[in-house]
Image: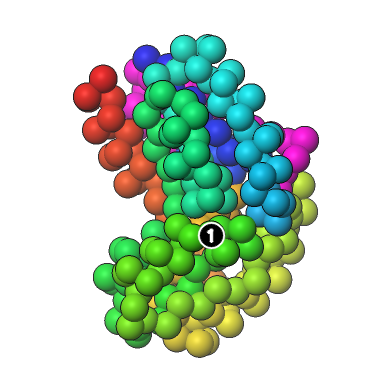
């Protein structure tokens, strides 16, 4: 079975590797859009224009499921993509629900792109699951590009994590797959103070459910 995995850049490669490891019988076709990465500050209509032909390529190549390994695309465009294309899709979005359920301090931090944070889907998640919880949204608008270009400012990342922990956040939500590549750095900085949450395991579980129904 062919599975398509899409992200704007290298972030989704981490997700594709996790799928290959956990579900080795699948043929994983990975596509990214290096010409236009990062997506996080682009207009939504422009992003949709970029990704429509890429998703059509997945269909043409026989993919039976598409994993949208991009929080920006999922939170803003997953409904339109599902209407446009007939194959099942698995999206990735900030894991606010488990963060809200697990917090002891009633403060969580969500690290995501400006487009994700401004999306209707993100606001619904926050209002639905974190009503009585303080949600910090640090400015990490340059993180994806730093990771994409392998030009990471570790001190800047560490300062951002330190600030979130100092403000009481005990759950750190990685709301962009690019950030999965620096998860170990974030965990090291937050060690003993905060847990780091990203959605690869739930995505794998959902992918398994969809495959079993095909």
Residue 150 showing in the rendered view: no
Residue 151 showing in the rendered view: yes
Count of numbered marks: 1
Q: What stretch is highlighted in magenta?
A: 16-38
Pick the front one: 94 or 122: 122
In this rendering, position of residue 131 left or right of residue 18: left
Crowd around label 1: few <14 · some 14–19 · many ≥20 (10 Å): some
Query: Quarter-wise, where is residue 18 in the image?
Result: top left
The x and y percentages for residue 165 are 50, 81
Query: Residue shown at 53%/44% (left/top)?
Result: 77
Query: Residue shown at 61%/58% (left/top)?
Result: 115
In this rendering, position of residue 32 left or right of residue 193: right
Under circle 1, the secondary element is loop
Q: Quadrant of the N terminus?
A: top left
Residue 44 in the magenta stretch? The answer is no
Instruction: Give the residue at mark 1.
Output: 119
The x and y percentages for residue 159 are 65, 77
Query: Quarter-wise, where is residue 12 in the image?
Result: top right
In this rendering, position of residue 62 left or right of residue 150: left
Depicted 49 relative to depicted 109: above or below: above
Residue 33 in the magenta stretch? The answer is yes
Pick the front one: 95 or 114: 114
- Check the image and tell me how it is coloured: rainbow
The x and y percentages for residue 128 are 32, 68
Query: Residue shown at 45%/58% (left/top)?
Result: 121
Query: Residue shown at 33%/83% (left/top)?
Result: 132
Residue at the limit of the structure toward the top, as seen here: 61
């Amino acid at each position: 079975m062919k599975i398509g995995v899409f992200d704007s850049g290298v972030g989704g490669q981490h997700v594709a590797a996790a799928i290959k490891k956990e579900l080795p019988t699948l043929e994983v076709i990975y596509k990214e859009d290096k010409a236009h990465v990062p997506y996080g500050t682009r207009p939504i209509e422009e992003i949709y224009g970029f990704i429509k032909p890429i998703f059509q390529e997945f269909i043409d190549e026989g993919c039976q499921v598409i994993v949208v390994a991009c929080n920006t695309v999922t939170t803003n465009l997953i409904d339109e993509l599902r209407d446009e294309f007939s194959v099942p899709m698995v999206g990735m979005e900030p894991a606010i629900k488990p963060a809200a359920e697990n917090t002891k301090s009633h403060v969580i931090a969500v690290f995501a792109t400006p487009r994700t944070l401004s999306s209707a889907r993100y606001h619904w998640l926050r209002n639905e699951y974190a009503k009585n919880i303080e949600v910090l949204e640090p400015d990490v608008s340059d993180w994806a590009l730093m990771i994409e270009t392998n030009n990471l400012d570790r001190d800047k990342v560490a300062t951002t994590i330190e600030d979130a922990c100092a403000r009481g956040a005990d759950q750190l939500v990685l709301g962009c797959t690019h950030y999965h590549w620096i998860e170990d750095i974030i965990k090291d900085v937050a060690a003993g103070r905060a847990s780091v949450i990203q959605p690869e395991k739930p995505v794998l579980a959902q992918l398994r459910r969809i495959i079993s129904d095909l």
